[in-house]
Image: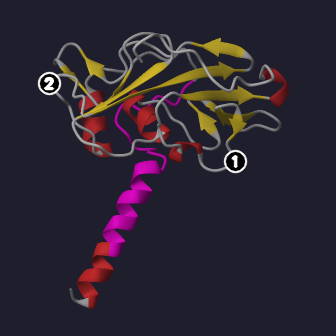
């Protein structure tokens, strides 16, 4: 392989890796206001999927089939994660990252084995999620976006968190005192998950 092709390949791979976890400020239908936030499964869902490189599948695909559970808090108040994220009932498609109910369980059901990130889930949802903003709630003094996985605070970019099987995630906006402590290390999953 020529040096020029090798450099181009490295550049393309680096850009692809950066795009998977970078904030997607220009996603179609991106919700940047204060909650409550719905499933956001309207006309913009298919366009968001194209923008982030996920598929509009005719049915669930189970070559990779894992689950995570996420809880969200805003200023100390629980926020439901809506049913139907990543599912369009009108156009009859589903994507690899979705929710079936408001339990906070994220379903990763993919026709290929690959890594998925928390940032990709928020992009499917169409809810702004960065190190400093959750929807319309952005860092303001001691109020910040804070994330824990399995009870451990995340210090790096939370969008890059890999969605692994039975990962417990807490996403909170507010002061540290507004988050109930200790943060749970593990959320329960129903039998068969």
Residue 86 visible at all = yes
Q: Nearer the viewer, residue 100 or 114?
A: 114
Total marks placed: 2
Q: Is residue 160 above or below residue 146?
A: below
Q: Which residue is mark 1?
A: 155
Q: Is residue 160 above or below residue 38?
A: below
Query: Which SS class for mark 2?
Result: loop
Q: Is residue 5 above or below residue 139?
A: below
**Residue 192, horizontal then vertical, whole percent:** 39, 14
Q: Tell me the residue at 24%/31% (across/down).
A: 46
* Mark 2 Cα-neighbour bin, 10 Å: few <14, some 14–19, many ≥20: few
Q: Nearer the viewer, residue 4 or 43?
A: 4
Any mark on residue 58, and which? 2
Q: Which residues are magenta?
A: 10-33
Q: Does 24 appear in magenta?
A: yes
Q: Is residue 72 above or below residue 147?
A: above
* Mark 1 Cα-neighbour bin, 10 Å: few <14, some 14–19, many ≥20: few
Query: Which SS class for mark 1?
Result: loop
Quadrant containing the N terminus in the rendered view:
bottom left
Rendering quarter of residue 132: top right
Rendering quarter of residue 112: top left
**Residue 76, horizontal then vertical, whole percent:** 74, 17
Q: Tell me the residue at 54%/26% (across/down).
A: 33
Q: Tell me the residue at 63%/23% (across/down).
A: 186
Any mark on residue 76, and which? none
Q: Does 87 appear in magenta?
A: no
> In the image as oriented, which residue stretches furthest toward the bottom?
3
**Residue 89, horizontal then vertical, whole percent:** 22, 13
Quadrant containing the C terminus in the rendered view:
top left
Q: Using the numbered discs, state the Cα–Cα distance from disc 2 to disc 1 in whole angstroms.
A: 37 Å
Q: Nearer the viewer, residue 120 or 45?
A: 120
User: First in sequence: mark 2 or mark 1?
Assistant: 2
């Amino acid at each position: 392989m020529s040096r020029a092709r090798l450099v181009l390949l490295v550049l393309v791979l680096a850009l692809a890796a950066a795009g998977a976890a970078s904030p997607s400020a220009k996603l179609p239908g991106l919700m940047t206001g204060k909650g409550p936030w719905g499933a956001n499964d309207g006309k913009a869902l298919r366009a968001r999927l194209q923008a982030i490189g996920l598929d509009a599948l005719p049915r669930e695909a189970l070559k990779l089939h894992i689950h995570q559970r996420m809880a969200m808090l805003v200023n100390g108040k629980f926020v439901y994660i809506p049913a139907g994220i990543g599912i369009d009932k009108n156009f009859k498609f589903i994507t690899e990252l979705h929710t079936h109910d408001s339990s906070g369980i994220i379903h990763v059901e993919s026709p290929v084995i690959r890594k998925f990130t928390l940032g990709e889930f928020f992009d499917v949802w169409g809810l702004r999620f960065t190190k400093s903003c959750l929807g319309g709630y952005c860092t303001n003094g001691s109020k910040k976006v804070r994330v824990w996985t399995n009870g451990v605070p995340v210090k790096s970019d939370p969008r890059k968190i890999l969605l692994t099987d039975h990962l417990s995630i807490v996403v909170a906006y507010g002061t540290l005192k507004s988050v109930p402590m200790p943060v749970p290390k593990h959320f329960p999953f129903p039998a068969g998950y």
